[in-house]
Image: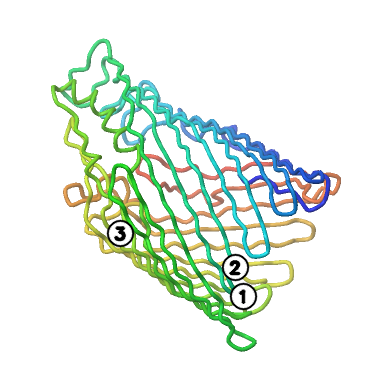
Amino acid sequence: MNTKTAGPGNGASGNARVSYGSYNTVIEQVDMAGRYNDVDFNVAQGFSKSNGQRANASGQLSNIMGGLGFKLDQNWSVGVSGMAINNTASDPGNNTLPTPEIAPTYDSAAQMVTAYLKHRYDLVEGEFRFYSNTGKGNINNENGQGGWGTENNPFTMQGFRWKENIAPWSGGNLVAGLDYDTTYGSVTQTSPAAGFPFFPGDPTPVNPPTVKTNLPTFKLTSPYVGLSHGFRMGDAWTLQPSAGVRTYQNNYYAAKTAPYGGISLISDTVTLFANASKGINYPGLEGPAMNAANAVRAKRFGATANNSWANLSPEEMNHLEVGDKFYPDKKSRVDMSLFQDTISNRYTFTETAPIVNWVTVGQYTTKGIELSGQCEIIPEVTGFLGWTYLNNNSTTSLPYMPQNAFNAAITGYAYKFRVSVDAQYQSSFYAQNLSRNAAFTNTTRIDGFGVANARIAYPIPELDKKGEVFVMVENIFNQQYGYRQGYPMPGTWGSVGLSASF
């Protein structure tokens, strides 16, 4: 959810929306922003809950966020913002397996506060921002075969962001900054209750043990710098090259460097571009957290869990892309890009009961195409079409990667009714392999599917500019589909709602 930003003048405004639909689904949102002289503020709140289309498939999400800023003078400002979220969901289980006697639940929560100091001059602008984020990700009563029992996972993330944008000369831009992050937490695990073994032959104790493990503190320091310049080429074109580098230093894993470079040829109607970049992804708390929980399991079998997570390497992705943006007129746009991503040192885990081992596996390359276009078909009716093609050379059938995906949408007015219809189709794909290596190939294939949705709204002027009553229908044609085997998505369902602004 994005907060509403304050306008340039004094005053306050906001929006509100509420809806009710199938499966006792309730969604409510309110946001407001305002400014009074040198003080600006914003606040937003959201709540949703649903019983779900299956037994034990309920969920609830709630959040609140807000911010307060103060302008010190023409160049400097300070502010603080915060957010709190609290979510819970039940797991109905794989419908191809027996229903669990006790449905597991998953609770997550986070509280974040950030404070900033900003400055803005003619040639330089930047900010320093400190943040602190605490939260939890808990599992309750996952007692089935191979389950983790009950597990409490609190965490803390803290750090700062410092960024400066400098215009050293006409047409040039220099960006530089420094990011610093620390992450730590703990795992408190209670093994599955008696009668719920991890695996056949598991000596499940009558009184399940509870063990708390404090996790290591990860520290990541990342300075970066980048430079770009626009060269005017006559009255119609600008050539803009850019280059930069970000470096990473971690207290557990190897230091890495991630350079990037690109060039764009820009006019009022066409942008042609090419770029190359490297991305780095460091292992985090997931490794030691899983090994800490696994230590309880291993001990029951007379085995000793290891610290295999400490031997991992950061993931690397080399990205290459060329493409264009074309604007035939003010109400039309066509985007196309060809790209290639080569991923190496992907970290994951393998499992040989009762031991979990974290490993770094091979390399694979994904090549793809993205093509999209939007235009005004007739006055006040806009259409959109999109296509994504993905093809990888992995021999282990990577999950969640359909080779083809299509999206289409039409939005417009019929009399006073605002009508929006969208549809998506994606081809079949593999799912549920965890390790992505030759020892654990993926054989679970999910069928392709197409889904269409619609929304019709009627304006209510008495509720201000955004006032309306609306009806939404999801999965109009009642398609049977899913993203994971044994977890079907809902059939046709709908909701009605009311929106207002003030």
Percent of width and height locating residue 338: 41, 72
Q: Residue furthest top?
A: 207
Say whether residue 282 is left or right of residue 411. Answer: left
Q: Quadrant of the N terminus?
A: top right
Identity, as a three-letter code, of the amino acid under mark 3: Ile
Instruction: Please tell me which residue is depicted at 63% across the width and 79% down the height of the picture.
Output: 268
Q: Secondary structure at mark 1?
A: loop
Give the quadrant of residue 351: top left
Mark linked to residue 486: none
The residue at which mark 1 appears reads as 170
Q: Residue furthest bottom?
A: 234
Mark linked to residue 343: 3
Percent of width and height locating residue 371: 49, 70
Circle 2 crowding by C-alpha within 10 Å: few under 14, some 14–19, many from 20: some
Identity, as a three-letter code, of the amino acid under mark 2: Ala
Say whether residue 222 is left or right of residue 473. Answer: left
Circle 1 crowding by C-alpha within 10 Å: few under 14, some 14–19, many from 20: few
Q: CA distance from mark 2 to mark 1?
A: 7 Å
Q: CA distance from mark 3 to mark 2?
A: 35 Å
